[in-house]
Image: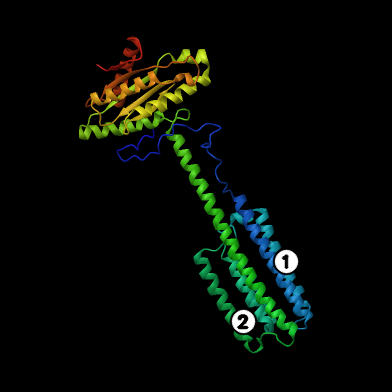
Amino acid sequence: MSIAPAPLGRHLPPIDPQPPTLTSPHVVRRPVDVAPGRRTRSVIQTLAAVTVSYAVDTVLLALFAAAGTVSAKLPLAYGSAALVICGTFFLLFRSGLNRRLRDPSAAMMQIGAASALQLACIAFVPHLAFVFLNILFIVFAFGALRLTVRQSLVAVFIVSAATGGVLYGHWEEIRVPHASAFEALLVWLCYATTLGRCMYAGLYGSTLRVKLHTRNLELAKSSAQIERLASYDELTGALNRRLMWGLLEEQLEHSRSTEDAFCVALLDLDGFKSINDRFGHAVGDAVLQEFAATAAASLRASDRIARHGGEEFLVLLEAAPVEQATAALERVRRAVERHDWAGIRPGLAVTVSGGLAAFRAGESATDLVSRADGALYDAKRRGRNCLVLAD
């Protein structure tokens, strides 16, 4: 039986009759690693893809040099500049100095360096400007993986303005090479590789979003599990003592203002020490688990049961006059007495004694539980396996 969420505005997960153990699938998993080291590795992976893209550009420029469109010095200069840019950022990330920056990915710095290289090439080789304009699309496709909306707008404005200035200064020299079939083929190849790399950047960003979503789900599950373990007894699945006393204090405040009747009870397994001595602590733990599940199934949906310590359990019976509370606890006593305990160990029999106390106006939670404890002591003294009402 799952106990319903507590009233009075407190939202609690349902009690699990099979509590988390060291071998249970409910064990809290190791929290998702969001350490700076992992973020740095992700940035370096992106930088590696950027390096490959620069290599593709260098090869294309070398082919244009082979076609006689540009000097052979251009691919050499471009490749060297790209190598310096990528190497500088790799050392920045590898050393960890990037963590001192406001943006550890240094995305704006990378876009600035890449855009400056393309604009310089347009200025020196304007008749091949379309190649470097294509590359700017790739630069921003990769940059979008790390930039914020504000950074993106700033980068687009600055680079667009700078590009316009360079193109205006060389507009008469700008053309698309088509002097030979080979040049035409290279023009197509430039567009094809640009489309492919932009698509790769989009797919890579989609993969990052999927991974982030998965990690967020894992973190949410871990947080929920931690919260659950903080509210429930690990062995029995019943509420723990700390949470139960919080609920009891809330109930007291509620009843003081509304004068609603409620009761508390202390239940104690009879002769539990002899069970541990005779059958071992593993059997004792199984008995506690079975008892908690049996008691929860016998109580009302609005009742709360918590492990108060050892083999003692505290029950909060909300909106329950003495007659209703007595009937509920008597159901628990009979259910425990009739339960098939031999399923745990042949020859095993378990009974429970209880002390019940109804709330009195003006008393504290400690006083109320103390009266229930006194009634429990009387139940033990009267021969056990019985329920005694305080006073």
User: Where is residue 273 drawn, in percent x and y?
Assistant: 46, 14
The foreground one among 36 and 330 is 330
Residue pictured at 50% horizontal, 33% vertical = 20
Quadrant (top left/top right/bottom left/bottom right) for the N terminus: top left
Quadrant of the rendered image containing residue 100: bottom right
Q: Confirm whether residue 185 shows in the render.
A: yes
User: Label 2, on which residue?
Assistant: 166
Quadrant of the rendered image containing residue 250: top left
Residue pictured at 56% horizontal, 32% vertical = 23
Quadrant of the rendered image containing residue 145: bottom right
Residue pictured at 44% horizontal, 37% vertical = 228
**In the depicted structure, whether residue 93 falls above or below residue 123:** above
What is the three-letter code of the residue carrying label 2?
Answer: Val
Q: Confirm whether residue 359 shows in the render.
A: no
The foreground one among 45 and 151 is 45
Please state if 21 lies on the left or on the right of 63 as rendered.
Answer: left
Residue pictured at 68% horizontal, 84% vertical = 127
User: Where is residue 137 drawn, in percent x and y?
Assistant: 60, 73
Report helix, strand or loop for mark 1: helix
User: Where is residue 174 drawn, in percent x and y?
Assistant: 65, 86
- Label 2 crowd bin: few (<14), some (14–19), many (20+), radius 10 Å: some
Please state if 356 lies on the left or on the right of 31 as rendered.
Answer: left
Please state if 13 lies on the left or on the right of 158 as rendered.
Answer: left
Report helix, strand or loop for mark 2: helix
Going from N to C along the chain, the mark reached first, 1 or 2, is 1
User: Label 1, on which residue?
Assistant: 83
Q: CA distance from mark 1 to mark 2?
A: 24 Å
Label of residue 153 in the image = none
In contact (CB < 8 Å): disc 1 and disc 2: no
